[in-house]
Image (spheres, grey):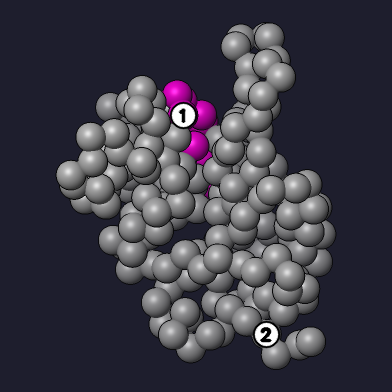
Amino acid sequence: MMSGSSGRSEVSGLYHERQRLELCAVHALNNVLQERLFTQEAADEICKRLAPDARWNPHRSFLGTGNYDVNVIMAALQSVGLVAIWWDKRRPLEQLSLEGVLGFIVNVPSNVSLGFLSLPMRRRHWIAVRQLDGTYYNLDSKLKAPVPIGGEAELRLFLQEVLSQGPCELLLVVPHEAEEAGSWLSTVK
């Protein structure tokens, strides 16, 4: 079963899945990895492994529509040899070394709507950011197509703006070697 409409963007050449149900975590994983590696079924299997004896699985929506938590994202990345590093928002983004970072997965507040009607409540939403040919792109599954952010300076501004919007979390997606070497962290103070 497809995880939403997906494919290569004609403009950028980037792989980009569009939002379906509450599968933004699955879309963010596939968008940051630039291929369809994960499905709703794969994410549900990870949930079962994380909480094998749970009557109501705490890592996803009880409605079966997705809404996966960070533990599912971290386990999914580990299954393909990558690591999610939680960025400490107290650190200045100048300390982020982009060389060893494959991409970013960001958890942001999101308005809830039913069709054209916006409801007075907020949920959490996962988005991906990835670089291609020197340009970083916002690969949010709620967007019709990838949106160019720019180079390193523009990426830092984008991340700073996102993180300043309240309860947001930033995950760095890096290879195991980069995590072990700490190459994602610059010595700049």
- Give the magenta part as a residue range: 14-24
Kind of residue sitting beneath label 2: Ser
The quarter of the rendered structure image containing the N terminus is top left
Residue drawn at point x = 48 percent, y = 81 percent: 178
Give the image location of residue 85, x and y in percent. 51, 68
Does residue 8 appear to the left or right of 144 in the view shown?
left
**Amino acid beneath label 1:** Glu
- Element class at badge 1: loop
* Position in image of residue 8 (x %, y %): 49, 40
* Earlier-in-chain disc, 1 versus 2: 1
Residue mark closest to the camera, 1 vs 2: 1
User: Magenta span: helix, strand or loop, mainly?
Assistant: loop
Q: Is residue 88 above or below residue 109?
A: below
* Residue occupying image coordinates x 75% and y 47%: 166
Count neighbours of disc 1 (C-alpha within 10 A) and say few if under 14, some if 14 to 19, many if 20 or more: some
Residue under circle 2? 186
Q: Image check: 16 left or right of 93?
A: left
Marks 1/2: CA–CA distance: 35 Å
